[in-house]
Image (cartoon, rainbow, N blue to C red):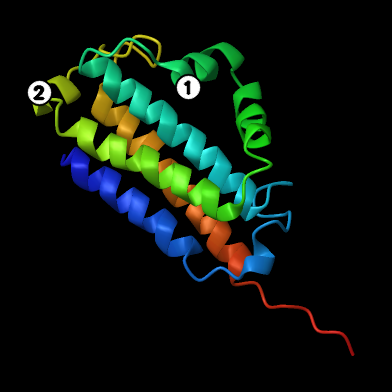
Amino acid sequence: MNAADILKYGHLTVLGTVAALPDTAWETPGVCGVWSVKNVLAHLASYEAAIADILASFVGETATPTLDRMRKQGAAFNDAEVEARSSLSPQQIVDEYAAHYTRVADLILQIPAEKRREPGTLPWYGAEYALDDLLVYMAYGHKREHSAQIAVFRDKPVATSR
């Protein structure tokens, strides 16, 4: 598996999905439950920060604030992170997401492939899983899923009144 490519293609999918989104569509609910595109991107930005924390732990960094919140808050993490970004503009959220991705892209290159494939390096994720497994789900599949939701929302025909 080429982890850097997996990360890159997930990232490009997100950016491509929102590139042509009209300004008026960013805050309309209904993309994923009650979440708007802005909320989904805030959610993805928080996950990208957590991925950066995870990768940083593999290169000797010990501070993992976003990952710590994710693990402590469980299901409440998603709504808390979206709420924490509610005052930001869509562009600020995209910029935050992209900044976290830039860090992720740099960090993945510092982790040897053998280490990424080694099961049990993330005991909280599952002893049978390796970092590569987490990246396929959390950094690729997760982004593809939400990008598909945004695309369906974005491409819905606009109702016209008679």
145 to the left or right of 61: right
Residue at 68% in and 41% down: 86
Q: Amino acid at mark 1?
A: Thr
Q: Up-down: is 54 above or below 138?
A: above
Residue 63: x %, y % from top left: 37, 12
Residue indicated by mark 1: 66
Residue indicated by mark 2: 114
66 to the left or right of 156: left
Q: Up-down: is 4 above or below 28?
A: above
- Number of labels in the image equals 2
Q: Residues within 10 Å of mark 1 (few under 14, many from 20)?
A: many
Q: Up-down: is 68 above or below 137?
A: above
The answer to which of 147 and 42 lies nearer the viewer is 42
Q: Decide if residue 129 is in sight here.
A: no
Q: Residue furthest right?
A: 162
Q: Residue furthest bottom?
A: 162
The answer to which of 37 and 146 lies nearer the viewer is 37
For the C terminus, the image quarter is bottom right
Q: Nearer the viewer, mark 1 or mark 2?
A: 1
Q: Residues within 10 Å of mark 2 (few under 14, many from 20)?
A: few
Q: Decide if residue 10 is in sight here.
A: yes
To which quarter of the image does residue 112 belong? top left
Q: Amino acid at mark 2?
A: Glu
147 to the left or right of 61: right
CB atoms at circles 1 and 2 under 8 Å apart? no
Q: Secondary structure at mark 2?
A: helix
Residue 108: x %, y % from top left: 21, 32
Residue 109: x %, y % from top left: 15, 34
Among the two numbered marks 1 and 2 on one chain, the one whose residue lies closer to the N terminus: 1
To which quarter of the image does residue 54 belong? top left
Residue at 58% in and 64% down: 152
Q: Which mark is residue 108?
A: none
